[in-house]
Image (tube, grey):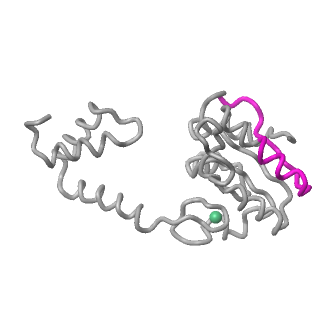
Amino acid sequence: MSDIAPPVAALIEEFSKLPGVGVKTAQRLTFFILRSPTDQARRLAEAIMRVKESIIYCSRCFNITESDPCPTCSNPSRDQELICVVEEPLDVLALEKTGVYKGLYHVLHGALSPVEGIGPKDLRIDELLKRVKGNKIREVILATNPNFEGEYTADFIRRELKPLGVRVTGLARGLPIGGDLEYADEGTLSRALEGRRDM
Ligand SMILES: [Zn+2]
């Protein structure tokens, strides 16, 4: 790539750092930007910066938001006694798309992984326990990913919640095993939510 103009090489390099983007795709994206109108390229650059400058974490549910508490936490028509625990903000999007869930969320920002050295303190687990202790919570739904780390995390949280006397449920089977919640289709997710079982 030594003959490529440095700005082009730099953009290819930045794109290739994105998840799931190899060098070939990074080159395609770069040449797409080169051919696009200046306005479109500017909107992309500005959208990237806005995400970094205006997005914060909700101090209650830890979802990404522009205002704290987030619109979901401050919406009085949501069921304030029901918390759905997920790994990532993308999982919230996936569950919201089903239109079935009307409670609140709690975003852990990852899953426990003994292999990768990710422990309870690296996730928002203490914050969840505080939330359950300090509020009138009827049920906590554990909606971590249906893979090893996800199940391990759900099991850990279930044991921590047990002494608090709150009902703990898990999504029904039927989600693709080993997959991520965010990739499940809306029908499968709705059924998994509605068929949730006590843990
Ligand atoms: Zn929130």
Q: Quadrant of the C terminus?
A: top right
Verify whether residue 174 appears in magenta.
yes
Viewer-closest of 27 and 6 = 6
Viewer-closest of 1 and 36 = 1
**Residues drawn in magenta:** 155-176
Q: Residue at 66% across / 56% down in the picture?
A: 124
In the shown orientation, is residue 61 left or right of residue 66?
A: right
Q: Is residue 81 above or below residue 174?
A: below
Q: Position of residue 155 (x, y in %)?
A: 78, 41
Ligand 1 quarter of the rendering: bottom right
In the shown orientation, is residue 122 left or right of residue 102?
A: left
In the shown orientation, is residue 176 left or right of residue 15?
A: right
Choose top left, top right, bottom left or bottom right for residue 136. Answer: bottom right
Q: Position of residue 190 (x, y in %)?
A: 70, 41
Verify whether residue 1 appears in magenta.
no
Q: Quadrant of the N terminus?
A: top left
Viewer-closest of 122 and 58 = 122
Q: Position of residue 115 (x, y in %)?
A: 61, 35
Choose top left, top right, bottom left or bottom right for residue 187. Answer: top right
Q: Position of residue 27 (x, y in %)?
A: 23, 36
